[in-house]
Amino acid sequence: MTWIRIPRPWEVSGREVTPEAVFHGRRDFLKKMGILGAGVAALAAAPSLAGLSRAFAQRSAAPVNPNSITPESLTGRFNNFYEFSADKGKVWRQARDLKTAGWTVRVLGHVARPGELDVSQLIRGWSLEERVYRLRCVETWSAVIPWRGVPFKELVKRVDPLSSARYVKLRTFLDPDTATGQHERFWEPWPYTEGLTMAEAMHDLTFLAEGMYGNGLNPQNGAPLRLVVPWKYGFKSIKSIASIEFTDRMPETFWTTISPLEYDFSANVLPQTPYARWAQQYERPLGREGLTPTLPYNGYADAVAGLYP
Ligand SMILES: Nc1nc2c(c(=O)[nH]1)N[C@H]1C(S)=C(S)[C@@H](COP(=O)(O)O)O[C@H]1N2
Ligand SMILES: [Mo]
C-alpha cells in the first residue's frame, strides 16, 4: 500500500508550506474514500487505496513526499508498550493475546455524564478523520504515522465535564495474566496512567485514534483506542485506554511516579532542554539513516505554543 503524505494546515510550522487548495482537495479525496463522513464500512468497501492515492497525487500540484511516512512494517514491530515487554522487538508478539472485543471505556470524575462507553458502538458513531503526525519518543527515535480517529475533544464534549474539571487522567487496562510486563514488573505503578490539562485535551491536535495506515489499530499500537498528542514525548500518547477521569488536580502518571526528577507532567518536546536521560536536539527516524534535528514542540509550535505563555 502506498501512502502519500499531504501536509495539513497545522504542519505549516514544520518544513513545508501547503497551498490551501491542497487541503480542500485532500478533504474531497477523503470524502470520496469514505474516511470523512461515512466511516469504516465505506472505507472497507473503497477501491484500491494505492490507486486512489496515485490518482490524487497526479491531480494535485502538491509538494507531497511519499517517503516520510514510516513503513508500517517498522511501527508495527518496534514498540514501547511496557505492559507486555520492555523489549521493543518483542511487544508485538506478546500483545497478540490482548482481547479487544467488547472493550469498554469508563468515564468518571468531574463530569456530567459518567458511565461505561462501548468502544465499537462509539466508533460507529464517529466521522473518522485521517491525520499524519510525527511521533517523537523521549528515547530519541521517531516515526511519521497516518492515524485514523477523531479529535479527542469530540469525546470530551460528549461526556460534558463539569467546570471544576481541570485535568484529564487516562488509564490503561490492568490484567497481569495477559500482560506479562505487569506480571514480571509487578512493583511498577500499574495501570499505566497519563494526563493532560483540559486546555491540552480540548486542543484540535489532540487525537483519539482507533486506526493507523487505513486499518484498525493492532494490539501492539494500542488497540482498540489510544491517545495521540504529537507535540509531547511519545509516552504521553497512552495506548489501550480503559478509563478517562476528569479531576480537579494534576494527576500522578506512570512515569512521574517512577522517576519524578526525570519526568514532568507536561513533557513537551523542547529540543534545547535535555529531558530524562537523553539530549533532545536530534532524533533518529525509524527506517532512515542518521539523525535529523528535533523541532520545538515536535514541529507543532505554531499550533500549540499559545498553550504555554
Ligand atoms: N499503555 C501504554 N501506552 C504507551 C506506552 C506504554 O508502555 N504503555 N508507551 C508509550 C511510549 S514510551 C511511546 S514512544 C509510544 C509508542 O507508540 P508505538 O509503539 O505505537 O509507536 O506509546 C506510548 N504509549
Ligand atoms: Mo517513548
Image: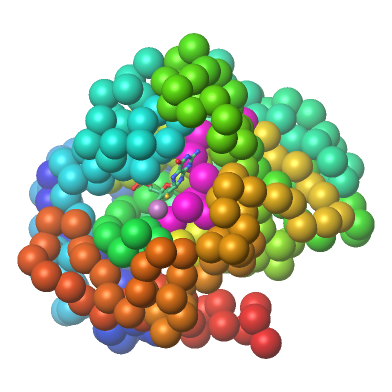
Residue sitting at x 36%, y 31%: 85
- Where does the image place residue 50, in percent across and percent down from the top left? 13, 48
User: Is residue 4 within the magenta segment?
Assistant: no
Quadrant in the picture for the C terminus: bottom right
On screen, residue 236 above or below 94: below
- Between residues 50 and 250, which one lies in front from this camera angle? 250
Q: How many marks are shown on the rendered structure? A: 0
Whether residue 247 is visible to the viewer of this picture, yes or no, is yes
Residue sitting at x 91%, y 57%: 164
Left or right of 140? Residue 285 is: left
- Between residues 79 and 150, which one lies in front from this camera angle? 79
Residue sitting at x 53%, y 63%: 262
Whether residue 42 is visible to the viewer of this picture, yes or no, is no
- Quarter of the image where one finds residue 267: bottom right
On screen, residue 90 above or below 59: above
- Where does the image place residue 287, in percent across and percent down from the top left? 13, 56
Quadrant in the picture for the N terminus: top left
- Between residues 123 and 133, which one lies in front from this camera angle? 133
What's the coloring here? rainbow
- Quarter of the image where one finds residue 296: bottom left
Left or right of 61? Residue 25 is: right
Q: Whereabouts is ligand 1, in terms of quadrant?
A: top left
Residue sitting at x 35%, y 36%: 86
User: Is residue 238 within the magenta segment?
Assistant: yes
- Quarter of the image where one finds residue 233: bottom left
- Where does the image place residue 252, in percent across and percent down from the top left? 70, 50
- From which residue to which does the magenta span run? 234-242
- Where does the image place residue 215, in percent across and percent down from the top left? 31, 36
- Between residues 261 and 231, which one lies in front from this camera angle? 261
